[in-house]
Amino acid sequence: MQFQFSGLADFLAMDGHGVYVWSCYGVTLLVLVGLAIQPALHRRRLQRELQRQRRISEARRQRSENRVAEPV
Amino acid sequence: MGRSRLAWEWFHRLGSPRWFYHKTGAWLPWLALASLVLLAVGSAWGLGFAPQDAKQGNSYRIIYIHVPAAFLALAGYYIMAVSGAIGLIWKMKLSFVVMRAAAPIGAALTFIALFTGALWGKPTWGTYWVWDARITSMLILLLLYIGVLALSRAFSREQVGDRACALLALVGTVNIPIIYKSVDWWFTLHQPASIKLTQSNSIDPSMFYPLLTMIAGFYCFYAWTLIAHTRSLVLQREWRTQWVQQALGEGS
């Protein structure tokens, strides 16, 4: 097995087909990276939402406690 | 009797989102590693070391992503439709989640197949797009995936959305044999398959092995992302349960 090109410039140019070949590989890489990181982003969104809801219920609980403590 | 009960229990556990979530967590790093290695090796091999094609020159190197992506786009449709069917028949919760997770991945892979095909067509056929039977049926596949994706977000009640998606996915399976056979039935522009299991290949081993590596890499990548997407959808669906709140609280 042998490297088929004489140098980097040759490798990038691919006898004029470089534009097509490299844009295919580039776009594919972007799409695959997007698919791979999407679950992690989704999970983070869910985590933030959970924290937000916890803060809200915590605040609500404290407010009701305060109300009980204060004489009317 | 004992064995069949065991099998039944296993089937039920498999249908439990919680069991799935805890079981699959350990698989993800291995699948990710395998797909990264295979895809990196296969790309380097296909781009730099496989010999040039006698007729097409270097543009043929697009095959190393075009064919695996198209493979998985089709296989992924089966996975989506079969999960939908299992969900409809056995009312299995997890199976609908797998179906929903398969839709964006399948759409992305179909997009890759179409995009790389268009860019390959320009230097080879002199045009980006033709309404050839294979290309048109692949476009329909993309629209089916997008349809399922849109339907899955259209209903506020999850169960109704599940059933609608499964029905659309099942109806769309008629398209799959059409895609497979399109190059033989309507011999237009797209070339027939070069890899056949039954007959000898029309592709040289020096080009075939890197292609095989890329196909294996895409399979691993598919398994990895399908499981990862399913897991995050499970968290979303089981949002109110204690175990999900614990899992989300743990960080990472």
Image (cartoon, rainbow, N blue to C red):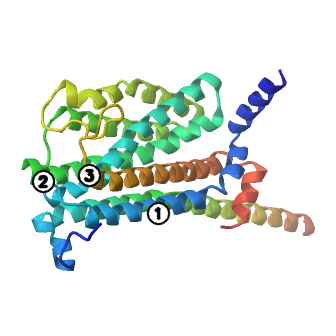
Tell me which corner region of the image, top left, top right, bottom left or bottom right, holds residue A68.
bottom right
Type of amino acid at the residue the image marks with label 3? Ile
Number of residues whose C-alpha sits closer than 10 Å to that of mark 2, classed few (under 14), some (14–19) or many (20 or more): few
Q: Quadrant of the C terminus of chain B?
A: bottom right
Q: Say whether residue A43 is visible.
A: no
Residue A52, given in percent of the width and then of the height, sits at: 66, 64
Circles 3 and 2 on the same chain? yes
Specify the subunit that label 1 lies on.
B
- Lower position in the chain sequence, tag 3 or tag 2: 2
Q: Is residue A33 above or below residue B164?
A: below
Tell me which corner region of the image, top left, top right, bottom left or bottom right, holds residue A29.
bottom left
In front here: A63 or B34?
B34
- Lower position in the chain sequence, tag 3 or tag 1: 1
Type of amino acid at the residue the image marks with label 1? Leu
Task: Determine which residue is flagged by label 3.
Answer: B63
Q: Secondary structure at mark 1?
A: helix
From the viewer's perspective, is B224 left or right of A64? left
The residue sitting at 51% across, 36% down in the picture is B155
In front here: B76 or B201?
B201
The residue sitting at 57% across, 49% down in the picture is B227
User: Of the numbered discs in the image, which one, if any, rests on residue B56?
Assistant: 2
User: Of the numbered discs in the image, which one, if any, rests on residue B36?
Assistant: 1
Determine contact: label 3, label 1, CB under 8 Å.
no
Specify the subunit that label 3 lies on.
B
Number of residues whose C-alpha sits closer than 10 Å to that of mark 3, classed few (under 14), some (14–19) or many (20 or more): some
